[in-house]
Image: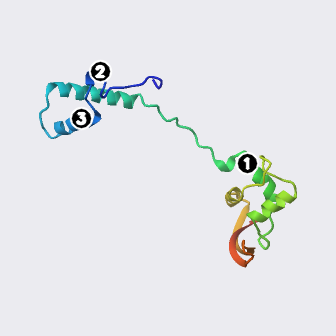
Amino acid sequence: MADIKRKFYNTGEAKGFTKRIFFEAVLALSNGEDIDAETLELVTAAAEYEIDGIDNRPKKAATDKKDALQSPYAQEIVNVMLPMLGTEATPKTANDLIAAAAAAGKKAPSGKDFSVPWVARVLQNHPNVGSKVIVVDTTDAKGLHKQKEVTGYFRV
């Protein structure tokens, strides 16, 4: 049905009959006003056309959403990052873990470094990993040193 172009309004016998006229006629009927027989016939045909269009609309496939945390990428993050985690006394940030993995030659399946948001998401949802807020020293683009709070991860 998708390859058939459906047309009704302003074509063939309905020449000059637009959606606006259709809805004005429906509104007039709902208000109890009388309309001529020709317009009533066109309104009936247009209503059937609209219902047919609704019935033949492509259905959205009900797909099972896969849990992103069960993906091969997430599993690779767990396999690489879990052995690198420290204790609660020495938590490591996602950036530290990614840098350590890169130094050890461990990369994402794409060959690039792991993504910080993904590492954080996977570690926060892993049952053997705890997290706490730690303060780290950073240097901005102007060379100014400042401290900021980040999440540190450790083994439970």
Mark 3 residue type: Ile
Quadrant placement of the N terminus = top left
| Rendered location of residue 27, percent (x, y) | 20, 39
Query: Which residue has dot 3 on it?
Result: 21
In the rendered structure, which disc, 1 or 3, sits on the residue that comes first in sequence? 3
Describe the element under mark 1 as helix, strand or loop: helix
Classify residue 153 by image quadrant.
bottom right
Decide: is 89 above or below 105.
below
Q: Secondary structure beneath disc 3?
A: helix
Circle 3: is it few (<14), some (14-19), or many (20+) Cα within 10 Å? some
Which residue occupies 21% across, 38% down? 24
| Numbered disc in front, either 1 or 3 | 3
Task: Provide the residue designation for mark 2.
Answer: 12
Q: CA distance from mark 1 to mark 3?
A: 56 Å
| Vertical side of 120 occupied by 60: above or below | above
Q: Residues within 10 Å of mark 1 (few under 14, many from 20)?
A: some
Residue 79 showing in the rendered view: yes
**Residue 16 sits in quarter:** top left
